[in-house]
Amino acid sequence: MLINIQKGDIIDIVFPATGSSSTELLAIKNYVKTQLNLTPRILFENELIFTKETAENEFPANDKRQRFQQLKAALENSDSKILWCGRGGYGSGDLLPDLQKIQKIKQNKLFIGFSDIVSIATFFQDNWGWNIICAPVLLQLARNDIEKNAENELKELIFGKKSEFSYDLIPLNKISDSDISTQICGGCLSVLCGHFGGDFQINFADKILFLEDEGEDGERLDRYFRQIIEVIFKTKSAPKAILLGNFSQANPHGTPKAKNIEIAIENFVKRIADFSLRIPVFKVKDNNLGHSHKMRPLILGHAAKLTQNQQLIIKI
């Protein structure tokens, strides 16, 4: 069990990126109360400026100092065990310079989120040694955007009712003849690439690098994949394996062409071979990791195993 969560426990709901409307906040709190039987808390809710009912963009509605104040207070509250992001969107990277200035809190907490939230999740994993649950944000769950099987599995994880998770994989090249045991890192590809070359670049050395995204055309993905190859050579470090999640889900800004996504992935695997990099690449068989209506939870920073039976196994 990662953290001992009990019914009625306080959950701090944070918005380090895009905010939500008043209607969405009510839906989120109602979901936490009725579907999780936990106690929702949104710090500084009355002081923060949340989005209008209809927003024309996903830029953060409130200043980064306000968003950091909420995150920091939630981290420091000793009476909560979970920080769960209410929404992804855009802007969590703004908080990293201030987050870097504070000391690691003594209490270990669950931090749940994905997409743009990968900026903060990566910081916690690389600098604080935390396990991160890469899973849907609360607004998705409140809107019933996630299939019930995936939602129920997430609940089982949170409340310690499931001790092993397995994911079926498709090998895209044949490199290793043995199991690979290490921790997983990564998340939304475009967000990770936004930090390449800076202080908050992900440390993927000797880990399983998990990559996924939504609404990105194959040409953009090809560019991001090429960046990863460049970073490997620049840092002289490489992941033990690469795990590709779902890339095919559309976002409000466009629907990617499935064929072009396939070309980008094929090019990526070919470049790995062309540069004599012995990195096995796997694809999640059911496209159920990352942006997907059937998104399953994935624990980052925890011991995991890629088996010769084309499975990813995580035991808690």
Image (cartoon, rainbow, N blue to C red):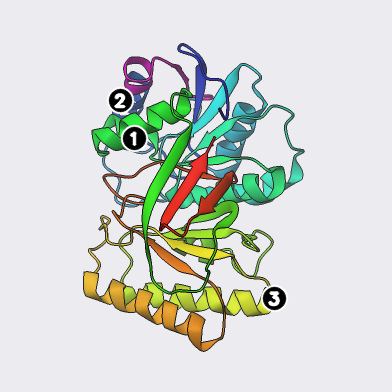
- What is the three-letter code of the residue carrying label 3? Lys
Where disc 3 sits, the SS reads: loop
Q: Residues within 10 Å of mark 1 (few under 14, many from 20)?
A: many
Where disc 2 sits, the SS reads: helix
Q: In the picture, which quadrant includes the N terminus?
A: top right
Tell me which residue sits at (57%, 30%) in the image.
2
Q: From this viewpoint, is residue 257 visible?
A: no
Q: Does the magenta stretch include residue 39?
A: yes
Q: Tags 1 and 2 in contact by the CB under 8 Å rule?
A: yes
- What is the three-letter code of the residue carrying label 2? Ala
Tell me which residue sits at (40%, 27%) in the image.
156
- What is the three-letter code of the residue carrying label 1? Leu
**Rendering coords of residue 161 (x, y %):** 44, 24
Q: Which of marks 2 and 3 is nearer the N terminus?
A: 2
Which one is nearer the viewer's eye here, 184 or 74? 184
Q: Tags 3 and 1 in contact by the CB under 8 Å rule?
A: no
Q: How far apart are marks 3 and 1 (CA)?
A: 40 Å
Q: How far apart are marks 2 and 3 (CA)?
A: 47 Å
Residue 136: quadrant of the picture: top left
Relative side of 285 to 278, left or right? left
Q: Is residue 274 magenta?
A: no
**Rendering coords of residue 13 (x, y %):** 48, 28
Q: Name the residue under label 1.
A: 139
Q: Mark 2 points at which residue?
A: 27
Q: Residues within 10 Å of mark 2 (few under 14, many from 20)?
A: some
**Rendering coords of residue 45 (x, y %):** 47, 25
Q: Mark 3 points at which residue?
A: 236
**Rendering coords of residue 76 (x, y %):** 67, 26
Q: From this viewpoint, is residue 113 visible?
A: yes
Q: Tags 2 and 3 in contact by the CB under 8 Å rule?
A: no
